Image: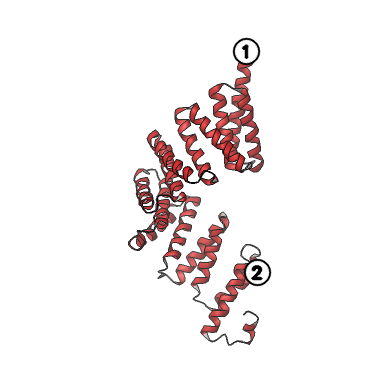
Amino acid sequence: MITLSIKLNLALKPISKIVASAYLGKALHFLNKDDQQFQKYFDKAINLKTDFYQAYAEVAIQCALTGKQDYIEKSLNYFEMCFEINPKITDTNLIQAYAIVLTEMGAFKKDKKLILKAIEFYKNLLNVLQSDPNYLKNYANSYKKLALLSNNSKSLFSEAFKFYKKSLEINPNDIQILIDYGIAIFYSAQINKDLNLYNNALKQLEKAKELQPKNLNVLTNYITCLLGVANINEDVHIFEQAKDTCENVLNIDPNNLSNLENYAICLSALAELKNDITIAQKAIDHFERALKFKPNDKDLNHNYKEAISIRNSLNNNIATI
């Protein structure tokens, strides 16, 4: 179509629209590969059709799907252009995609205004989409992320829980809803140091684990929650449970970074609680494996130094016996 466009009358709207779509397709082909080529073809598309808000929307969606932080930021910019060209968009999928990106960028930039803007979009869709579990889950996620940025988070978490529950009433076995709800409860438990909330979070994640026992996303979040419960009680049994689950993940994916770190944390805690220098050394070995992937991570380095301190302390205890 692009080759043929030389012979076509681009002044005719139907033809210019078709050619503009062809240029957009070519631009999207280069989106993650060549910025110059992407921009060249994208400019041709929007020059042919100046009100081509769908082009901005399509680029925004494709950028968001990469999951990369810099592309999510690009996604937000393209969505803003899309809604600037056509502020009366009624496509609920498009509005939701924009709201998801607003939430993600708001959380990343610690900008509550972006998340509040997303919540306003969700609020406007409630009458139309109140029976859509994914919409309800995404709405809840916005409240959860706003709660994490707010000092007075209790009422915001309550709003999040309300929409997660509605979502699960419609689709009780949706793995992602169970994970998101469980982790929201977990965050609230951390803030409030509330064991009952930790146990409630575990219930959601245990249900997800029963449904998909080998799902790495489920297992990683389940371990995170187990560690929260274990830490609040200094409970050897629950640390052992977390350790065993970590070992299951290692059998599925030996280089899963989140799991390597969680495994090392479990071992470090168990070494201290059991006064076992062998476990402490094993924790250090796994921290070092994780540090090969993230050598500059502050939390990882802090936990690594803690593990070394525990081993040295146990070593000194042996020396004085």
Tell me the quarter of the image containing the C terminus: top right
Residue 17 percent location from the top left of the image: 53, 80
Residue 175 percent location from the top left of the image: 46, 49
Q: Secondary structure at mark 2?
A: helix
Q: Tell whether 143 sits left or right of 269.
A: left
Camera sees residue 298: no
Q: Tell whether 40 sits left or right of 223.
A: right
Q: What is the tally of numbered marks visible in this picture?
A: 2
Residue where numbered disc 2 is placed: 37
Q: Nearer the viewer, residue 291 or 150?
A: 291
Q: Residue at x 62, y 13 (%)?
A: 320
Outermost residue toward the top in this view: 321
In the displayed structure, 176 sits above or below 28; it is above
Residue 181 percent location from the top left of the image: 42, 46
Residue where numbered disc 1 is placed: 320
In the displayed structure, 235 sits above or below 137; it is above
Labels 2 and 1 touching (C-beta < 8 A): no
In the displayed structure, 78 sits above or below 67; it is below
Q: Secondary structure at mark 1?
A: helix
Neighbor class of circle 1 (other Cα within 10 Å; few <14, some 14-19, many 20+) is: few
Task: Give whichever of discs 2 and 1 has the lower sequence position.
Answer: 2
What amino acid does circle 1 point to? Thr
**Marks 2/1: CA–CA distance:** 69 Å
Q: Nearer the viewer, residue 187 or 220?
A: 220
What amino acid does circle 2 point to? Gln
Q: Quadrant of residue 155?
A: top left
Tell me the quarter of the image containing the N terminus: bottom right
Q: Nearer the viewer, residue 255 or 311?
A: 255
Q: Quadrant of residue 46?
A: bottom right
